Amino acid sequence: MQKVEKISLDGFWDLKNSEKSVEIDAQVPGTVFEALLANNVIEDPFYGENEHEMKWVYESNWFYEKEFNLDPEFLKHKHIILRFMGLDTIAEVNLNGELIG
């Protein structure tokens, strides 16, 4: 049986919208709304009429980015699986500038 090694990419990622009007740190796992709320970009969407003022959040495309390094020994594995748990709606995944999913 082959040994399975796992590397977690949980933690802080860079989050920005397509308009570049928002660039913040975002905790992963987490949602865009949680990150915006944690960084005081939006008010609580579940309070009063706040949700109606956040249409721009739904209309924006959002990008999560993270730099990470792998030990050269890790790259010698025959198969490397990059697994995302919880991508929602429509997503593209790029690695080193190349679309992989």
Image (spheres, grey):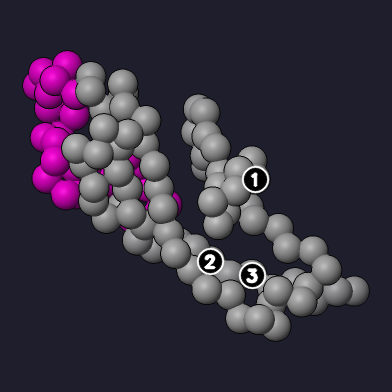
Locate residue 56, reporting x and y percent.
23, 23
Does the image show residue 85?
A: no
Q: Give the quadrant of the N terminus.
A: bottom right
Q: Is residue 21 above or below residue 3?
A: above
Foreground residue, 63 or 96? Answer: 96
Kind of residue at disc 1: Ile
Kind of residue at disc 3: Lys
Q: Is residue 81 above or below residue 56?
A: below
Name the residue tied to disc 1. Answer: 100
Give the total of numbered labels.
3
Locate residue 77, reporting x and y percent.
78, 73
Q: Secondary structure at mark 1?
A: loop
Region in magenta: 27-54
Left or right, 62 with respect to 21, comes to: right
Q: Secondary structure at mark 3?
A: loop
Q: Cα distance, mark 3 to mark 2?
A: 6 Å
Query: Tag on residue 8?
Result: 2
